[in-house]
Amino acid sequence: KDVLLEVNQLQTAFKNDKGEAVAVEEVTFRLMPGETIGIVGESGCGKSVTSLSVMRLLGSSGYIKQGNIKLEGVDLATLPESQMRKIRGNDISMIFQEPMTSLNPVFTIGNQMIEQIVLHMKLSKKEAKKYAVSMLQKVGIPRPEAIVDEYPHKLSGGMRQRVMIAMALSCNPKLLIADEPTTALDVTIQAQILELMKKIKDEYNTATMIISHDLGVIAEMADKVLVMYAGQVVEEADVYTLFDHPKHPYTKGLMKSIPHLEHDQHTRLASIPGTVPSLNQMPKGCRFHSRCPYALKKCTSERPPLLPINDSSHQVRCWLYEDQQHDSNAGKREVL
Ligand code: SF4
Ligand code: MG
């Protein structure tokens, strides 16, 4: 199988009054057809910027400064906007946390879906409407032939997210990007939407990037995981390795906080004391050092690279694992 998406040393920056702020850097990953990658971290860690870079939806102040983003070998980072427009909604679709921000309140569900289907699939309006109804049915909307003529505000949050999924999948994208797709929903509905996404992903073999602050969502959905902190990937592993053998002190901090998650997001953040450094004032050395209970002297001055653990695909950006790459006795150094 060929690689679907290859992100290489991505660096994305935003212009601001101080010049520019680098929001993500050195982000590298690959995604195979049908595979799901989860990107997890606190707000401001760069996970959304990473996905918006792939979509090239960075607004007027954002730009890809370095690196490339290859979709089936074509570099999206340098593609003209006119071609990028054809890729969005066709090869790559996106669903967001709050469907109301992407659904237009003045058009019926059907009209919004039909517009996109006609544009990308070259169907007649009549055929497109039939197809829209079948997609609504597929995502579990009851009475789809009636709902297709309703306005978005008539639907519950969960139903609106189902509509968004139907819209996102209607052009059979190769890649689906879901940014906090269930964060605005209550826990029961959240579980139903995740279930639906898994079912559809399997049926269409759609590769998925799922962005979440919630490790529970990531555990449920992802094959492999990037943990991001302050604009960098601090750990990468397949989902089983990450949850069974987390290495980075930040990842471990996130793990400890899982039981609190459903009750109160603030409890979770409090479990790792301190705050994320601001983009304009990145500390020297390891960006996590002021919050890290294991910080060594060199952590305050030397920047740790992302290094593989024992030559595996498990990678961690932390000086504690400096000796663990080829040295079989290295486990003894693991004090955590
Ligand atoms: Fe903590 Fe140092 Fe590892 Fe950073 S490099 S996570 S400060 S131990
Ligand atoms: Mg976000």
Image: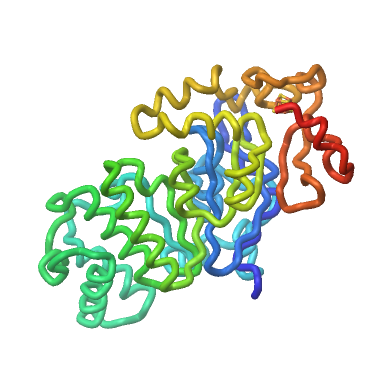
**Which residue is more in the foreground, 307 or 302?**
307
Q: Is residue 2 left or right of residue 218?
A: right
Location of the C terminus by quadrant is: top right
On screen, residue 87 versus residue 23, left or right, reads left
| Residue 184 occupies quadrant | top left
> Residue at coordinates 38% horizontally, 74% vertically from top-left?
120
- The residue drawn where x is 60% and y is 35% is 251
Q: Position of residue 143 (x, y in %)?
A: 12, 68
The picture quadrant for ligand 1 comes to top right
> Which residue sits at x=26%, y=82%?
124
Q: Is residue 58 left or right of residue 267?
A: right
**Quadrant of the image containing the N terminus:** bottom right
Q: Image height check: is 208 above or below 281?
A: below
Who's the residue at 59% across and 53% down the image?
224
Of residue 197 and residue 5, the one placed in the foreground of this image is 197
Q: Is residue 50 left or right of residue 106?
A: right
Looking at the image, which is closer to me, 28 or 11? 28
Image location of residue 89, percent across then percent down: 41, 64
Let me know if residue 82 appears in the view: no
